[in-house]
Amino acid sequence: MDLTKPAYLTEQSEERNTKVWMGSLDYQINFNNDRSSLITYLGWQQTDRTHYTGIIPDGGAEFQSHIENPPYGISDVKTFNTGLQLNHKFNKFIKGSNVMTFGTEFIFDKVFDEIPAYNYLIDQTTKNVGLFLQSDWEFSPSLTLLSGVRMDLHNFLEDPVLSPRLTLLYKPKSNIQFRANYGTGFRAPQAFDADLHIAFAGGGISRISLSPDLVPETSNSISASMNYDKVTDLFVAGFTVEGFYTRLNKAYFLNPIGADAFGELFEKQNGQGATVQGGTLELRANFNRKMQIETGFTLQSSLFDDPVEYIDGLEGIKRFIRTPNNYGFATISLTPNDKFTANINYVYTGAMKIPHFAGAPKQDVDELIDSKSFSELSLKMSYAIGLKKFGNTFEFYGGIKNILNDYQDQFDIGKNRDSNFVFGPGQPRTFYLGLKLRTRK
């Protein structure tokens, strides 16, 4: 992109100029000998944005129209959130103690996003009132039951939505605990941030609209886990093993519905359903507060009940796109003294299904590809020097991101490239140095 030119004179570009105003206020008061508390809060944010998303035509009447009426747009987004929460602890509640919580909140969200040149407009106002009740019942030091229910009244829904949840925690010993969870949730048939995204593909832009028949997506989730820790004078070591299962009903997906003069069209629709299930193992250890190790690995499957057609004309698949079936992490933190620290971080991302639209040179067909797995290893070290006379500390730090340079090796080029064809680590191998000044208050 030539930064000396206006955005609309470059081959393909996006430009965003954003102004954001925000504010928040909260207040808490404790009373009844600290057995009760009242929490109130409110927040507000307004975002004003001018933006450009476009591809300059090769010439002729389309080029002249582009110059005279470049596809600039405006966004005006207002969000307001307020609520209150009342807590009260019953020291004697049938058996054991209980903290009861009652609360309510109101969320207002108005989105106006328009690009006149593309006949593109989202004008949406959502209002949601939530009421919730929760019980945190400690039967005994080894057994706790957390239960609650939330009712949402959304202006896009005819009926209230009830979302219960239940958690049982059992600690037979101080270093062992078992946890079981159940909960439900929903997403209203509205446009979310991802739906406002405009991408480039095949020499045009892709836009998302909402199906007029869209209904809420709901979920039911269960999980169970076990934690174990071994503690000695010199080290702490432990593990967590967890299994999870989530059933999505009428799950949302983007269905390709063809194209118009501006590019590809997608419609958010309800599918028949989907299932996400799997397990996670995490290990941890701390040696004399000098070295800490944390690692975890997840195996999962994410499948729709019926095949989903992600690209018009290609056979549908059940698997979620851009979602690996396995991923993990590992972190080693070294603190031999109060001056020197070192952190080694590793992130593993398994293979994924990635849509790839035609348009770039040597990319003549639309396809679904299998990405390779990625191993991202990074290192950061720091050293602190204290200035006793002034009470300040200088911290010198540096490191390497993505040491193995395991990076996406296939990128589209040219103005007709698929701008969404980006996956894997966010940066190639990167070196950095820095200096931080800490002042004593």
Image (cartoon, rainbow, N blue to C red):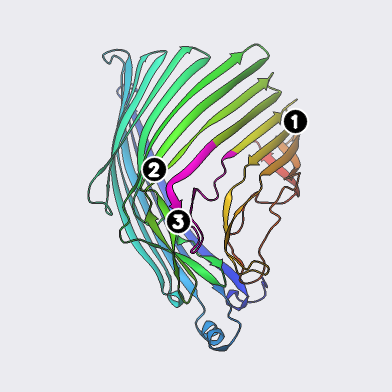
First-in-chain label (3 vs 2) = 3
- Where does the magenta region start and end? 300-326
Label for residue 248?
A: 2
- SS at mark 1 in the image: loop
Q: Helix, strand or loop at disc 3?
A: helix
* Viewport quadrant of the C terminus: top right
Instruction: Identify residue for label 1.
Output: 339
Residue 193 falls in which quadrant of the image?
bottom left
Q: Residue furthest left?
A: 159
90 horizontally vs 143: left or right: left
| Residue 121 vertical position relative to residue 288 in the rendered view, above or below | below
Q: Nearer the viewer, mark 3 or mark 1?
A: 3
Q: Image quarter for residue 294?
A: top right
Crowding near pointer 3: few (<14 within 10 Å), some, many (20+)? few
| Residue 423, position as x, y percentages in the image | 62, 53
Picture layout, residue 250 above or below residue 38: below
Q: Looking at the image, do the residues carrying marks 3 and 2 touch, with CB atoms under 8 Å apart?
A: no
For the residues labelled 2 and 1, the Cα–Cα distance comes to 50 Å
Task: Judge depth for marks 3 and 2 and give the one in front.
Answer: 2
The residue pinned by badge 3 equals 193
How far apart marks 3 and 1 lie (CA) works out to: 43 Å
Front residue of this view, candidates 433 and 428: 428
The crowd level at tag 1 (other Cα within 10 Å; few <14, some 14-19, many 20+) is few
* Percent x, y of residue 219: 37, 41
Name the kind of residue labelled 1 in the image: Lys
62 and 14: which one is in front?
Answer: 62
The CA distance from mark 3 to mark 2 is 20 Å
Q: Residues within 10 Å of mark 2 (few under 14, many from 20)?
A: many
